[in-house]
Amino acid sequence: MANKENDVQDEGVVVVMTDDQGNEYYYEEEMIIPVGEEKYALLVGIHNEEDDHDHCGCGCGCEDDEDVIIAKIVIGEDGEEEYVEPTDEEFEAVQKAYDALVEESEQE
């Protein structure tokens, strides 16, 4: 799960994701993708260029890959937006909606 923060520097939305070990990872909300009644966020990893370790810490060599994830936006019990992992079916629907948005913007 993740928390949403407003980054005052550039008015972007910063999302803090926490893994099972308590490590925090920072993402910027690149865009919101609506699918039916649901909303999903395209999140791009924010990395400190001084870091000399893998982005995900897994040792998989992904340090050269862009860190992008899709998260479903839900309203938590406290009334605040939360970001959760989508199901496989939701992820596929978001991919189709994103492709349609990209195709539409290329035609303009």
Image (cartoon, helix red, strand yellow):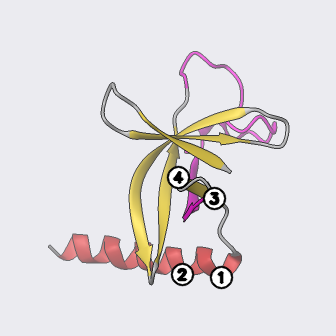
Tell how many labels. 4
Instruction: Identify the residue at horizontal 65%, vertical 69% (top origin).
Output: 86
- Magenta: predominant secondary structure element? loop
Specify the amino acid type for callout 4.
Answer: Glu
**Residue with the most extreme top position:** 50
Mark 4 vs mark 2, CA separation in Å: 24 Å
Residue that label 4 marks: 80
Rendered location of residue 99, percent (x, y)? 41, 75
- The mark found on residue 89 in the picture is 1
* Residue mark closest to the camera, 4 vs 2: 4
Local secondary structure at mark 2:
helix
Mark 1 nearby-residue class (10 Å; few <14, some 14–19, many ≥20)? few
Rendered location of residue 39, percent (x, y)? 46, 69
Residue that label 2 marks: 93
Q: Answer with mark 4 or mark 2, whichever residue precedes in sequence.
A: 4
Q: Nearer the viewer, residue 30 or 13?
A: 13
Residue that label 3 marks: 77
Local secondary structure at mark 4:
loop
Instruction: Identify the residue at horizontal 53%, vertical 21% (top origin).
Output: 49
